[in-house]
Amino acid sequence: MLIKRKDDIKSSEITPEHLYYNRREWIRMASVAMGGMAVGSIMSENALALTQDYKPKAKGPYDTDEKLNSYKDITTYNNYYEFGTDKSDPVENSGSFKPKPWTVAVEGHVKKPAVYNLEDLLKPFKMEDRIYRMRCVEAWSMVIPWMGFPLADLVKKVEPTSRAKYVAFETVFRPAEMPGQKRPFLKWPYVEGLRLDEAMNPLSFMATGLYGKELPNQNGAPLRLVTPWKYGFKGIKSIIKIKFVQDEPPTTWNIAAPDEYGFYSNVNPEVDHPRWTQKTERRIGEFRKRPTLMFNGYAEHVAGMYAGMDMKKNY
Ligand SMILES: Nc1nc2c(c(=O)[nH]1)N[C@H]1C(S)=C(S)[C@@H](COP(=O)(O)O)O[C@H]1N2
Ligand SMILES: [Mo]
């Protein structure tokens, strides 16, 4: 995401992320050569092994068979403003974040509200592998092998009442472990929401890992949301609270820049972001641009939920 500032205009177009990434890579390689940043080179070796050895256990009905992004791409090019606003900040600044032990508060219009230990919460669920495309609003994309469980399983377990129409999610607030939270990049804590039917859609996924390993801190450990037909910012990380509510809940990027980021945030090539086109995207690791697909290619599974809605108004 980009903060709305005049001099940011078209920065996603003028500074394609690969140039930026290559610059960071060059700096990293140079410092490895100079004997510094040994951690970086160990990380690269492990990342290479993870990428090459990974075999998804099951081919699910929603999986894409496109080429996976590497473990390194997925874990070193991140948006997680709690750890800083640069794509390399999350991997560099999340080392002292503690994703264990972890609790998740389930509140609001449910029959089983509770503060769950994450382990207890996860016990009844079967962990699955899912290979999903993710599309950031900044017009880049990745293909990620997630591990986790359908959000619908969790929703059913806590039994929402008939008054529950939306699900509101909240990220942990720990400025001592999350240096970005000491600065007003965004209004903290980060919050997001889904309509209840979106939360129940079989594509909505709670990720606890990727590439068959526990979720790294920079990707939202220990629990994050994945909604592959929506822009990446809906995928709220390090979730500590899930509240079932009657009215559309506030969402962080809508609070930050309401004319740029709406509640629905469905990937839609026909609705330009006010500062750049959404017609194309660049897959991380590639140079060419690809056309962006409606609902990020998941239209057959989700379009029905928005029938009759004006998708330009409800962006
Ligand atoms: N708490 C929190 N969640 C967040 C963000 C954030 O800054 N804070 N960034 C969002 C954005 S803009 C994107 S594109 C995705 C990136 O997920 P990834 O880094 O695992 O690829 O996380 C989303 N979830
Ligand atoms: Mo994003």
Image (spheres, rainbow, N blue to C red):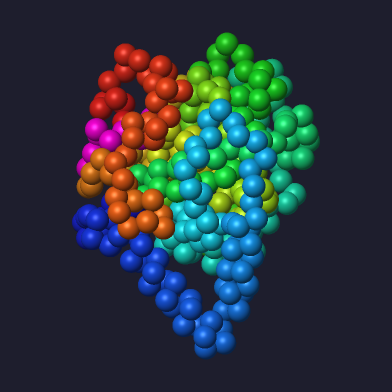
Q: Specify the farthest residue to the bottom.
A: 34
- Residue 111: % across, % down: 69, 17
**Main SS type for the magenta part?**
loop
Tally of marks: 0
Q: Is residue 166 magenta?
A: no
Considering every residue shown, the one lying at the far top of the view is 162
Q: Residue at x 43, y 33 (%)?
A: 229
Residue 258 percent across, percent down from the top left:
31, 38
- When the figure is inspected, residue 23 is found, relative to residue 313, above or below; the finding is below
Q: Residue at x 58, y 74 (%)?
A: 41
37 left or right of 78 in image = right
Residue in the image at 35% along x and 44% along y: 137
Q: Residue 172 location in percent, x, y?
A: 59, 47
Relative to the observer, which residue lies in front, 194 or 290? 290
In the depicted view, which residue is nearer to us: 129 or 178? 129
Picture layout, residue 120 above or below residue 109 = below
Question: Which residue shows up at 30% across the image and 54% down it?
Answer: 288
When the figure is inspected, residue 105 is found, relative to residue 6, above or below; the finding is above
Confirm whether residue 243 shows in the render: no
**Left/right of residue 267 with respect to residue 106 in the rendered view:** left
Q: Which residues are magenta?
A: 263-274
**Location of residue 277 (image quadrant):** top left
Which quadrant would the C terminus be assigned to in this image?
Answer: top left
Position above or below: 88 against 121: below
Describe residue 221's horizontal placement relative to residue 195 as left or right. right
- Can I make out residue 14 in this image? yes
Q: Position of residue 233 (x, y in %)?
A: 43, 43
